[in-house]
Image (cartoon, rainbow, N blue to C red):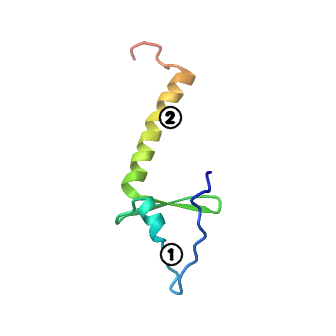
């Protein structure tokens, strides 16, 4: 399921990566995009959506860390 949207894409004769229209529409890419890589895979994201996901992930990670490790201050004032 993770790789369901994966497509192999070749570079054109000028070395450009041409994004298929269906993937561009699916990712809601307008004018700015982010390339995110992991291993030999590259993800293309609309810049604003990527920034939102990263921002949401940071707050989720912070909450999860607090739940797992507890509040360092334990209610004490610094």
Q: Quadrant of residue 7?
A: bottom right
Label 1 secondary element:
loop
Say the numbered circle drawn on residue 57.
Answer: none
- The answer to whether 51 is drawn above or below residue 60 in the figure is below
Q: Residues within 10 Å of mark 2 (few under 14, many from 20)?
A: few
Q: CA distance from mark 2 to mark 1?
A: 33 Å
Local SS, label 2: helix
In the foreground, 52 or 8: 8
Which of the 4 quarters of the picture holds residue 31?
bottom left
- Residue 55 pos. (x, y %): 41, 43
In the image, farthest residue toward the bottom = 13
Residue 67 or 8: which is nearer the viewer?
A: 8
Image location (x, y in percent) of residue 66: 50, 24
Image depth: mark 2 or mark 1 in front = 1
Residue 23 percent across, percent down from the top left: 48, 64
The residue tagged 1 is: 17
Q: Quadrant of the C terminus?
A: top left
Residue 61 marker: 2
Residue visible at 39% across and 57% down in the picture: 47
Q: In the rendered picture of this protein, how many numbered marks are placed on residues?
A: 2
Say whether disc 2 or disc 1 marks the residue closer to the N-terminus: 1
* Residue 12 in picture, x, y percent from top left: 53, 83
Horizontal side of residue 32 vs 35, given as left or right = left
Residue at image point 56% right, 59% down: 5
Q: Residue at x 47, y 40 (%)?
A: 57
Q: Crowding near pointer 1: few (<14 within 10 Å), some, many (20+)?
A: few
């Amino acid at each position: 399921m993770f790789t369901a949207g994966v497509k192999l894409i070749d570079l054109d004769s000028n070395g450009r990566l041409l994004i298929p229209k269906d993937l561009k529409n699916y990712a809601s890419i307008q004018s700015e995009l982010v390339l995110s890589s992991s291993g030999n895979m590259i993800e293309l994201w609309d810049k604003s959506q990527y920034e939102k996901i990263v921002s949401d992930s940071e707050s989720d990670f912070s909450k999860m860390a607090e739940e797992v490790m507890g509040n360092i201050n334990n209610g004490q004032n610094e």
